[in-house]
Amino acid sequence: MNPDDPLLKILVCPLDKGPLTLLDSGDTLYNPRLRRRYPVRDGVPQLLPSSGEPVSDEEHERITGGLQPQP
């Protein structure tokens, strides 16, 4: 998945229905509000609630260090 993919504008977290951020690696979508990441496998986002993984406080800080808040 790439940052210009129009699908990113409509994808939301399955738990809080808020926007997701594509991480630089291109293989992970991140919800900073719930601190959960969702894998992207073969270009297909895995957005089942059970697919999400919690992120530690340290990893959250590393991930969000360069992110701008979304409206």
Image (tube, rainbow, N blue to C red):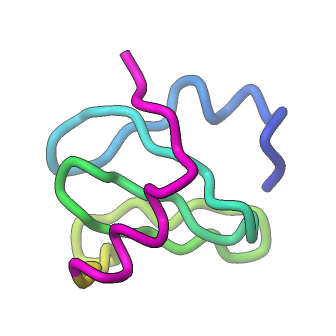
Q: Is residue 57 above or below residue 19?
A: below
Residue occupying the point 23% across, 66% down = 49
Query: Total marks drawn?
Result: 0
Q: Is residue 29 one of those drawn in magenta?
A: no
Location of the N terminus (image quadrant): bottom right
Query: In screen coordinates, is 28 left or right of 16?
Result: right
Residue occupying the point 15% across, 41% down = 16
Location of the C terminus (image quadrant): top left
Residue 61: image x %, image y %?
Answer: 36, 68
Q: Is residue 42 above or below residue 16?
A: below
Residue 60: image x %, image y %?
Answer: 34, 70
Using the image as rendered, state which of residue 32 and residue 53 is in the foreground: 32
Res 3 quadrant in image:
top right
Q: Magenta residues, as a range?
A: 57-71
Residue occupying the point 24% across, 77% down = 50
Q: Is residue 51 above or below residue 14?
A: below
Res 47 quadrant in image:
bottom left
Query: In screen coordinates, is 21 left or right of 18?
Result: right
Query: In screen coordinates, is 26 left or right of 66?
Result: right
Q: Is residue 58 one of those drawn in magenta?
A: yes
Residue occupying the point 31% across, 46% down = 13
Residue 44: image x %, image y %?
Answer: 67, 62
